[in-house]
Amino acid sequence: MLCEDGNVRLCFSKLFCWMADHMENATIHAIATNCCPACTTPTEKLGEYSGNGYPSRCHIDYATAYDKSDAASLTAHGVKNIKNAL
């Protein structure tokens, strides 16, 4: 990049934030639209406050289940049986 002082500098851009709505998150992460993309909150508890919280989604487990063709496990977690973008 050419700076104002006339010097050429190396610049490395970083992607640090990506805002997305729920439908876009669901599509990108290949989860059902009635599920939380961040945690394993049961569908009937969405929108309610939970003092203890729910565990985060483990996408590595989902990738392993996909590789093993374990569609039943993926469906039980609200994950679509497709290779997702991430």
Image (cartoon, rainbow, N blue to C red):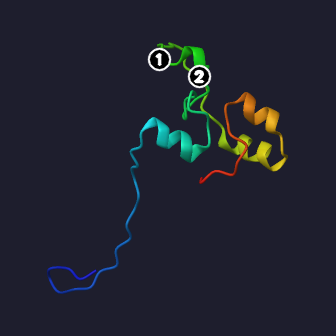
Secondary element at image label 2: loop
Look at label 1 and name its amino acid: Gly
**Is 14 on the left-hand or right-hand side of 78?**
left
Left or right placement of residue 39 versus residue 9 in this view: right
Q: Read off the residue under disc 1.
A: 47
Residue 59 lies, with reference to residue 16, above or below; the image says above
Residue type pointed to by label 2: Thr
- Would you place residue 86 above or below residue 79 in this image? below
Q: Residue 36 at x, y = what percent?
A: 55, 29
**Residue 73 falls in which quadrant of the image?**
top right
Instruction: Tell me the SS state at disc 1.
Output: loop
Where does residue 65 sit, x and y in percent of width and height?
Answer: 79, 42
Locate residue 29: give its quadrant.
top right
Residue shown at 58%/14% (left/top)?
44
How far apart are the two marked residues, 2 and 1, measured between alpha carbons? 10 Å
Q: Position of residue 41 (x, y in %)?
A: 59, 22
Relative to residue 54, is residue 85 depicted above or below? below
Is 85 rendered above or below residue 19? below
Name the quadrant of the N terminus: bottom left
Q: Is residue 30 left or right of residue 72?
A: left
Q: Which mark is residue 21?
A: none
Q: Choose between 5 and 70: the one closer to the eye.
A: 70
Q: Mark 2 or mark 1, which has the lower sequence index?
A: 2
Query: Residue beneath label 2, please?
Result: 41
